[in-house]
Image (spheres, helix red, strand yellow):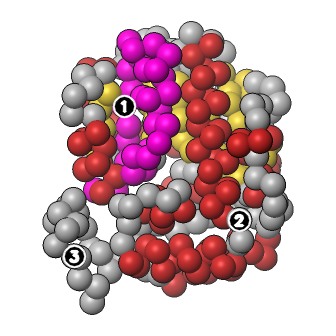
């Protein structure tokens, strides 16, 4: 069994380091240091099947910054980032508070490593907090002390769900789940979402999904088509350019786009406004 080196005193005691977490695999893809050998092994296998996957992770991360800045241009000053993952560069609070220090942010993740590091990062930030919860329990998230303290749900909120909904199986009724979140938001709120799809990478995505299944990870992917992802924006008005490949949503420059292996289209991306 893999043994955690003594230098990794950042590992919460509840974490089983023999089982991969997709939050930590994503951290590995972004070049982060808070992942284990089992995460790197799974990440390496997936990357072998899908060369350029690190670029897809980068493209998704760059979309986050563009989406936050777009929402701020529309007057949004409070954000709920569900499935925020392990902190890396250009987190929501960094992007938002760099433009307006008064912005308020609540992160949500169920991964204990992601939550532990978010807590450390936010210790001196009284306008940002993290909640450890499963996104499939919206009532607990919305009633949490952190959300109640920092967010006013009677005013517009920027809701972010990046690379999250493909971890929600069909039996959990994703459209109904999205409706709960939408109904809790005030008119004028925005939803930003990215969702991996096999529409443009069918064989490679299927093979990668098999790797995740065999890894014993609690995180398992459900592929959805363009129409199925579009349906998750029900009740929102998609802003231009609509639901497109992640790298194609209002790119500002070359760094926002992957230049090979079709990674711009691995995930769909969109931003919608609740009327």
Q: Which mark is residue 76?
A: none
- Lower position in the chain sequence, tag 3 or tag 2: 3
For label 1, the SS is: strand
How crowded pointer 2 is (Cα within 10 Å; few <14, some 14-19, many 20+) is rated as some
Residue 176 lies left or right of residue 131; in this view the side is right
Residue located 54% across and 62% down the image:
29
| Residue range (magenta) | 84-112
Residue located 56% across and 10% down the image:
75
Residue 87 lies in the magenta-colored region: yes
Dots 1, 3 in contact, CB < 8 A: no
Dots 3, 2 in contact, CB < 8 A: no
Q: CA distance from mark 1 to mark 3?
A: 32 Å
The relative height of residue 17 versus residue 111 in the rendered view (above or below) is: below
> Which residue bears the numbered disc 3?
5
Q: Position of residue 101 (x, y in %)?
A: 39, 15
For label 3, the SS is: loop
Q: Position of residue 234 (x, y in %)?
A: 69, 34
For label 2, the SS is: loop
- Lower position in the chain sequence, tag 2 or tag 1: 2
Q: CA distance from mark 2 to mark 1?
A: 31 Å
Residue 36 lies left or right of residue 43; in this view the side is left
Residue located 31% across and 43% down the image:
118
Q: CA distance from mark 3 to mark 2?
A: 30 Å
The relative height of residue 192 versus residue 60 in the rendered view (above or below) is: above
How crowded pointer 1 is (Cα within 10 Å; few <14, some 14-19, many 20+) is rated as many
Q: Is residue 32 visible?
A: yes
> Which residue bears the numbered disc 1?
106
Q: Nearer the viewer, residue 157 or 93?
A: 93
> Which residue bears the numbered disc 2?
52
Residue 153 lies left or right of residue 64; in this view the side is left
């Amino acid at each position: 069994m893999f043994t955690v080196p003594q230098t990794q005193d950042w590992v919460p005691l509840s974490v089983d380091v023999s089982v991969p977490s997709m939050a930590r695999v994503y951290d590995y893809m972004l070049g982060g240091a808070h992942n284990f050998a089992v995460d790197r092994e799974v990440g390496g296998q997936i990357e072998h099947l899908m060369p350029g996957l690190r670029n897809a992770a980068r493209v998704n991360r760059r979309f986050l910054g563009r989406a936050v800045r777009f929402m701020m241009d529309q007057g949004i000053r409070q954000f709920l980032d569900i499935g925020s993952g392990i902190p890396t560069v250009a987190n929501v609070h960094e992007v938002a508070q760099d433009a307006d220090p008064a912005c308020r942010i609540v992160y949500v993740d169920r991964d204990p490593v992601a939550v532990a590091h978010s807590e450390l990062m936010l210790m001196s930030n009284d306008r940002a907090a993290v909640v450890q919860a499963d996104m499939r329990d919206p009532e607990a998230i919305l009633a949490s002390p952190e959300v109640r303290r920092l967010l006013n749900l009677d005013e517009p909120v920027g809701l972010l769900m990046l690379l999250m909904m493909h971890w929600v199986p069909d039996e959990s009724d994703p459209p109904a789940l999205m409706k709960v979140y939408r109904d809790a938001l005030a008119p004028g709120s925005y939803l930003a979402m990215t969702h991996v799809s096999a529409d443009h990478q069918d064989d490679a995505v299927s093979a990668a999904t098999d790797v995740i299944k065999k890894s014993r990870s609690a995180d398992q992917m459900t592929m959805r088509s363009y129409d199925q992802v579009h349906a998750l924006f029900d009740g929102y008005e998609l802003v231009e350019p609509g639901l497109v490949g992640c790298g194609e949503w209002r790119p500002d420059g070359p760094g926002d786009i992957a230049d090979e292996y079709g990674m711009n289209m691995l995930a769909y991306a969109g931003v919608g406004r609740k009327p």
